[in-house]
Image (spheres, helix red, strand yellow):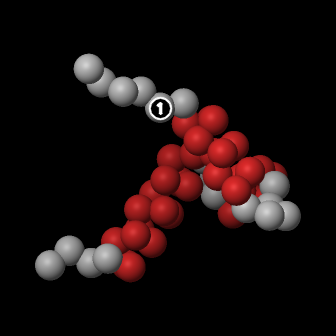
C-alpha cells in the first residue's frame, strides 16, 4: 500500500509548531511546497552527510 501525504496539511502542521511564524512568512522565502521540501532535504543532507 502506498501512503499518500497531504502536503498542504503538512505545511500547516509545520507552521503550527513554529511560534510566531505564519504561512505567509514561509512562502515569502519559498516559492512552493516543493521548494520547502527541497530546502529541508538540503539542510538534512548538510547536517547528516552520506558516508
Q: Position of residue 35 (x, y in %)?
A: 53, 54
Query: Quadrant of the image for the C terminus?
Result: bottom left
Q: Which residue is mark 1?
A: 5
In this rendering, is residue 13 above or below 51?
Answer: above
Q: Residue at x 66, y 45 (%)?
A: 13
At horizontal 49% and vertical 53% (from top left) the residue drawn is: 37
5 left or right of 45? right
Compared with 16, 25 (above or below) is below
Taking depth in this image into account, of 26 and 18 the one nearest to the observer is 18
Q: Residues within 10 Å of mark 1 (few under 14, many from 20)?
A: few
Q: Quadrant of residue 44?
A: bottom left
Residue 31 in percent (x, y) is at 63, 52
Q: Position of residue 20 (x, y in %)?
A: 85, 64
Q: Secondary structure at mark 1?
A: loop
Q: Is residue 49 left or right of residue 38?
A: left
Left or right position of 4 against 13 = left
Count of marks overlaid on the render: 1
Q: Residue at left 41%, top 62%?
A: 41
Amino acid at each position: 500500500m502506498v501512503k499518500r501525504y497531504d502536503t498542504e496539511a503538512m505545511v500547516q502542521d509545520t507552521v503550527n509548531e513554529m511560534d510566531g511564524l505564519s504561512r505567509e512568512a514561509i512562502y515569502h522565502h519559498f516559492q512552493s511546497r516543493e521548494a520547502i521540501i527541497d530546502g529541508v532535504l538540503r539542510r538534512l543532507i548538510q547536517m547528516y552527510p552520506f558516508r
